[in-house]
Amino acid sequence: MDRVSRTLRAADMSRYASAFASRTTARTRLPLDFSAASLRIVDRVVDGLRQGAGDPADVAPILQELGAYVGEVLVRKARARWVDFDGATSEMFRQPVGVRTPDERAWNPLGKVINRFELGPAESAYELFLLVPRRPKDLPLSPGTADSPRLTAA
């Protein structure tokens, strides 16, 4: 399956994922509420697509939307941000966009969904979420700021 969609841009991903979630929830009653638990639903949907798909190209658009949704969950719950990948990262992940967490690590939610489709349950959007570090909202993003917590010896 060709894994790169050149039409995706980081600036559009939050809106794209939100529109998909609203449309899908209204049509199917799946609770796509941007929670970590909803990523288990994504895994199950991909498994269903995997069983019913003849030509992988037929499901590529929905896999892209599901991947955008997974990325948006990371944005909302793990304080990640959407980024356009540079050439080397895009080639490595075979995607033009992904997310970066506050520790500056790059993550590939669109690729994770495609991997679930191609490889099966060994790949999981929910397990990806568990791997991504989450920082409490009250901690600063960069060390050394005036409001950084101080470490003290006990």
Image: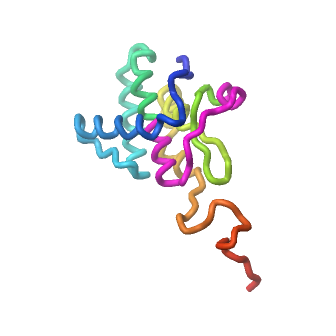
**In the image, residue 118 lies at what x, y percent?**
51, 25
Determine the residue positioned at 37% across, 42% down. 41
Q: Answer left or right for 33 relative to 80.
A: left
**In the image, residue 21 lies at what x, y percent?**
34, 39
58 or 44, nearer to the observer: 58
Q: Answer left or right for 31 relative to 120.
A: left
**In the image, residue 89 lies at what x, y percent?**
68, 31
Determine the residue positioned at 58% across, 50% down. 131
**In the image, residue 124 lies at what x, y percent?**
50, 40
Query: The magenta stretch spans which residues?
Result: 68-92
Instruction: Relative to 35, say whether 42 is above or below.
Output: above
Q: Is residue 79 magenta?
A: yes
Determine the residue positioned at 73% across, 67% down. 144
Residue at the bottom extreme of this rendering: 154
- For the C terminus, which image quadrant? bottom right
Instruction: Relative to 120, say whether 130 is above or below.
Output: below
In terms of image quadrants, where is residue 4? top right
Magenta stretch secondary structure, dominant: helix
Q: Answer left or right for 40 relative to 97.
A: left
Q: Is residue 30 magenta?
A: no
